[in-house]
Amino acid sequence: MDAMELIAFEIISNVGMAKSLAIEALRDVRMGNYEDGSKKIEESSEYLIKGHHAHTELIQKEAAGEKLDFSLIIMHAEDQMMSAETIKTLVEEIMLMYKDLKA
């Protein structure tokens, strides 16, 4: 496995975990476990940051003049990262709505 594939899998792994934690956070809040939901959404943010750091590595390489070949796996990793960010943002809003409705 080459360096590009390793970075892609690092992104996919981290943002996949972020997405899963966001969904778990929503389920916790739906059941009234606001504290657990908040912890999971914070943990989700940490995984997204790790995914962004790996992605930034690629951007820095290209900015330094390194030629990066087109890769479907990198494209997939970026797609997963954007999807995880969107899901997390929506989950945060839905969690706030649950709190407001239960108050």
Image: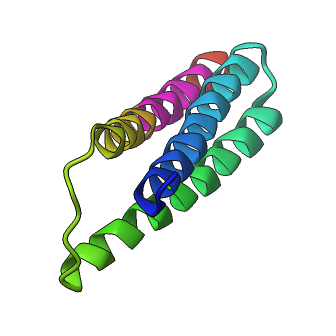
Find the residue positioned furthest to the bottom: 64
| 75 in relation to 91, above or below | below
Query: On the picture, is 102 further left or further right than 62?
Result: right
Question: Where residue 56 sits in the image (x, y, percent)?
Answer: 38, 69
Residue found 28% across the figure and 70% down from its top:
59
| 8 is within the stretch colored magenta | no
Find the residue positioned furthest to the top: 31
Question: Where residue 84 sits in the image (x, y, percent)?
Answer: 45, 36
Question: Where residue 38 sits in the image (x, y, percent)?
Answer: 71, 41
Query: On the picture, is 92 further left or further right than 77?
Result: right
| 64 in relation to 32, above or below | below
What's the magenta region?
Answer: 87-98
Residue found 34% across the figure and 35% down from its top:
76
Question: Where residue 16 sits in the image (x, y, percent)?
Answer: 56, 35
Quarter of the picture containing the C terminus is top right
Residue 40 quadrant: top right
Residue found 53% across the figure and 60% down from its top:
49
| 94 is within the stretch colored magenta | yes
